[in-house]
Amino acid sequence: MEYFETQIQSLLNLDDKAARRMDRLISDLTQKVGFEKQEILEFLSFSALEEVKELELNYDWKLFEKKLLKKLKGN
């Protein structure tokens, strides 16, 4: 695993597979909102804990991305 994936795993308490997938999702979000990967990870760990917990329960990555994108854009 890469360093950033390890950060994701430790901050969000995800397994290896989910951490890699979250890394890809965060990379996609950087293109859509213009934030750096580290900024999005910090946002996730402080301001989107409810969405992360919901993801753990339903494992619906599309819904998670939609909710997160809406939160990041402030809509």
Image (tube, rainbow, N blue to C red):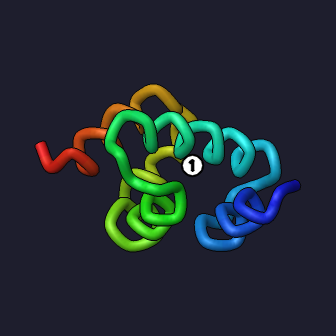
Asked if residue 67 is positioned above or below residue 49 in the image, the reply reads: above
Asked if residue 72 is positioned above or below residue 70 in the image, the reply reads: below
Q: Which residue is mark 1?
A: 56
Farthest residue to the top: give it: 62
Q: Residue visible at 51% across and 31% down?
A: 60
Q: Dot 1: what SS? A: helix
Label tally? 1
Q: Using the image as rendered, state which of residue 30 and residue 24 is in the foreground.
A: 30
Asked if residue 67 is positioned above or below residue 52 in the image, the reply reads: above
Disc 1 crowd rating (10 Å Cα; few below 14, some 14-19, many 20+) is some
Farthest residue to the right: give it: 1
The three-letter code of the residue at mark 1 reads Glu
Q: Residue visible at 44% across and 58% down?
A: 40
Instruction: Specify the quadrant that holds the C terminus.
Output: top left
Residue 3 coordinates in the image, percent (x, y): 79, 64
Residue 56 coordinates in the image, percent (x, y): 57, 49
Location of residue 59 (image quadrant): top right
Q: Using the image as rendered, state which of residue 7 and residue 54 is in the foreground.
A: 7
Q: Residue visible at 51% across and 34% down?
A: 28
Residue 61 coordinates in the image, percent (x, y): 52, 32
Q: Using the image as rendered, state which of residue 52 and residue 22 is in the foreground.
A: 22
Q: Residue visible at 74% across and 44% down?
A: 20
Residue 40 falls left or right of residue 27: left
Instruction: Specify the quadrant that holds the N terminus.
Output: bottom right
Residue 39 coordinates in the image, percent (x, y): 44, 64
Residue 73 falls left or right of residue 36: left
